[in-house]
Image (cartoon, rainbow, N blue to C red):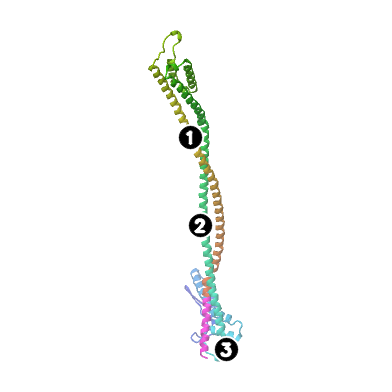
Amino acid sequence: AMATAGSYEVLLDVEGSSPPQQHRSNRKLMAGAVIAAVMLLAIALQTGEDSHRTALVSAAKMMGLYAELEVPRKMALMAMEHTPKEEQQLALSLASSEPMLADCARKAVYTNILSNFKYLQGNLTVENQTRVQTDLDLFVAKSSAYTEWIDSESAYRTAQSAKEQADAAAEYARSKFSEYKKAVEVGEEDYEKNIAPTLDEKAGLVLQAEMIETLTGVISKMSGSEAEATPAKLQDAKAKLAAIEAKNPKLGKLAGQVGSILDKMSPPAPAAKASRRLLGSGFEDTVKQALAILGEMKAEVETRVKEIDEAVAKSAAWLKANRATKLEWEVKVVDLGNTADRANADKNAADLEREKLAGVYKVKNAAYVDGHAGLEDDLASFSAQIAALQTVIDKVVELLAKC
């Protein structure tokens, strides 16, 4: 071996003959390639970095040459594994690069070699196809697992969003129920404090209206004749008027006016021997004046009764509406709470599913990575082996053609 700057050259002398005349066998070439590679590696260990790298590259090329030369020999041994030694040697010779002349006495051996080589080539072709199909199957399994995993991730996000929405809806329902529950409580308290007492007031007003109506009837009868205005009737009218005023002090002013009119309608005492202060049409006008004032009193009472009725109706309607709405939200609290529970269960199930499918994808992907890692080398090896077999097959076919 001789080293030069940046490159190395290994000179091998096979059987001592000069290159133009020597016929090298594959085995000799392979041995030479191995020896050259070992020498280059030894040089690499003793040189600088750049020279070291160059020597390593050259050694790798030599090992590659060795591998290329070794393939035909291995294929020949594999194809003729269970055949006689003579046939194996002939197959090795056919696998070498040496030219061969047809020996028709060996035609049967050629035929057997051809059959064995084709059989092995067929098997390797099937193995090659199987290797490709296995890689494809692993890729499809990995891709399918990935798709299922990504879909499960999407399903989980959807379930997670649905749960958040369901939780928000349930919380909103609870807040609305609390709102209307409080409104009903406030309304009921207000009804008891401010509305219920007016019902007692209304009962008194109705009685007052009836008393005013009765008093109006009594005085109305006096309008036709002064004779009807007897002291007893006038006294009865004053008593009714006093009762009305006692029940409703707000009518005191109007009651006082009616009282004054009743006093005018009363006859003078007998000792005075005087006539009534109001005679004829004057008396009738006085009665009308009293009736008009009584009408005002009745109108005030009826107005207040109407106000109470409206307030009671408004409060009752407001309470009824709020109670109904409270009940609606109470039902929704239960329904939406159940929906939120189901959404949470769905989310948890989706989470478990995505974790499971993530694990499946991890396994499938690892299997594909492991299986695919040597694909190119395997296919290259199959290609080289099949080509080597084909070379021998072509040689044998050519030899048989000459016999």
Q: Amino acid at mark 1?
A: Ala
Which label's residue is closer to the chain start, 3 or 2? 3
| Magenta stretch bounds | 382-403
Label 1 and label 2: CA atoms lie apart by: 56 Å
Query: Secondary structure under badge 3?
Result: helix
First-in-chain label (1 vs 3): 3
Q: Are marks 1 and 3 in contact (CB under 8 Å)?
A: no
Which residue is drawn at the image coordinates 53% and 58% (left, top)? Answer: 152
Residue 316 % position (x, y): 50, 35
Instruction: Read off the residue under disc 3.
Output: 108
Q: CA distance from mark 3 to mark 2?
A: 68 Å
Image mark for residue 154: 2
Disc 2 is placed on an element classified as helix
Query: Residue 323, percent across and down?
Result: 52, 39
Label disc, if present, on residue 313 of the rendered structure: 1
- Does the magenta stretch mainly form a helix, a strand or a loop? helix
**Viewer-side residue, 339 vs 36:** 339
Q: Is residue 184 among what the camera can see?
A: yes
Q: Residue type at mark 2?
A: Ser
Marks 1, 3: nearer the viewer = 1
Disc number lying in front (1 or 2)? 1
Q: Secondary structure at mark 1?
A: helix
On screen, 358 above or below 301? Answer: below
Q: Nearer the viewer, residue 51 or 162?
A: 162
Dot 3 crowding, Cα within 10 Å, few <14, some 14–19, many 20+: few
